[in-house]
Amino acid sequence: MASSIEIAGLRKNYGSLSVLDDISVSIKAGEFLTLLGPSGSGKTTLLMTIAGFVRPNAGSIKVDGREIVTLAPHKRNIGMVFQNYALFPHMSVGENVAYPLKLRGVGRGERDDRAKRALAAVRMEQYADRRIDQLSGGQRQRVAVARAIVFEPNIILMDEPLSALDKRLREEMQVELKRLHETLGRTIVYVTHDQKEALTMSDRVAVLKSGRIRQIASPRDIYDKPVDRFVADFIGDSGFVSLTDRGRGVDLAVSDGFRAAHVTGKADPLLLLRPEKIEIVSSPDAQPDLIRFDGVADDVLFQGDLVVVHATLADGTRLRLQRGTRQNTMRDLPAVGSRFRMAIHEEDAWVVSGVQAGEHAP
Ligand SMILES: Nc1ncnc2c1ncn2[C@@H]1O[C@H](COP(=O)(O)OP(=O)(O)OP(=O)(O)O)[C@@H](O)[C@H]1O
Ligand SMILES: [Mg+2]
């Protein structure tokens, strides 16, 4: 069974430092929610508060409608994979995995059976008798996951479980954790630094900054429709060009419809330009649904599957755009140092405010 989590008005201070600042979020039963944010933004503290290892200064955490904020960690039925795994080095793999069952008073025989099943779920059944220091990083990570799921918790919390692994293994484990989520059907709250990982794995992503949730949305919405410049910058590669100050030399033709829908009323509106959404315009025919602008190509870098162009606009804005490397695409590339025309379709365009909530335009 999976559980829902309802967090309301959660606050945690360390002295005068506000680490969780009025966090409210509803997590659906069976959802995969990822917390993403810079170092120190409060991700681990939020997980530790849900797990019961950190006591908040204010707020409520309800699981399936029941308040748990004062409940001891082992009574919460929540499994946790810690940021540094926290495996016991003096115990075997099997003993590590069985430990949460021992803590809950489960008898020897059943402990061994269930530990075996949890190890099988992460494909580590043949390693039960090994010591932890005889395992690779990826294997340790699997043991930590097995230990978190062995008592069949309704909620699993994972704090950067893949950060110690190299890129290839990390991608392999992403697929495995996703598969595990599908087979177990439990609610997962996951923390990562890696924005691609967050987009790949999650039903929803919450972006944190200084103990606050700046945006919570589906991977597509958080990438395509970030609420502000911070979120846009944090997720994916982004360039911005101002829509207020046309006097600075970038001549952007934006239709009245687009302006009314996305620009009017925004403080310091910035057009978000993702590298893969920028077209290179080679024909002079004007299409009304294209926002066009000119720049100079600084570099054209062939990377095998992609070709990357760095360009500078008239106001000094630097942009990155990328294309696939099919022959017809390669023919349209600008020469280094030449002026060329770019465009973004209005349906791909998104405007963010350059002013963060709570701040004021200069
Ligand atoms: N026990 C503590 N005492 C004092 N300050 C703390 C304590 N635990 C965490 N902090 C502070 O709270 C803030 C948030 O820490 P937290 O570990 O939640 O960040 P994080 O988002 O997980 O960062 P990282 O990505 O580096 O793991 C940091 O400024 C940290 O120094
Ligand atoms: Mg952390």
Image (spheres, rainbow, N blue to C red):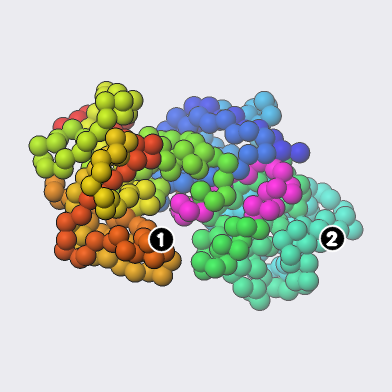
Q: Position of residue 305 (x, y in %)?
A: 43, 66
Q: Is residue 288 visible?
A: yes
Residue at (68, 62) in percent of width and height: 143
Instruction: State which mark lies toward you, 1 or 2.
Output: 1
Q: Position of residue 154 (x, y in %)?
A: 71, 41
Q: Residue furthest right?
A: 109
Q: Quadrant of residue 112?
A: bottom right
Local SS, label 2: helix
Q: Quadrant of residue 258?
A: top left
Q: Is residue 6 above or below residue 239?
A: above
Task: State which region is magenta.
Answer: 177-197
Query: Is 188 covered by the magenta stretch?
Result: yes
Q: Position of residue 183 (x, y in %)?
A: 74, 49
Instruction: Tell whether 96 sits left or right of 255.
Output: right
Q: Position of residue 341 (x, y in %)?
A: 22, 50
Mark 1, residue position: 324
Sequence-wise first label, 1 or 2? 2
Label 2 crowd bin: few (<14), some (14–19), many (20+), radius 10 Å: some
Query: Is 274 covered by the magenta stretch?
Result: no
Mark 2, residue position: 112
Residue at (66, 41) in percent of width and height: 187
Residue at (41, 70) in percent of width and height: 304
Residue at (69, 29) in percent of width and height: 64
Amino acid, disc 2: Asp
Q: 339 or 193, which is in the foreground?
A: 339
User: Is the residue at mark 2 in contact range of ligand 2, meaning its CB lies under 8 Å from it?
Assistant: no
Amino acid, disc 1: Gly
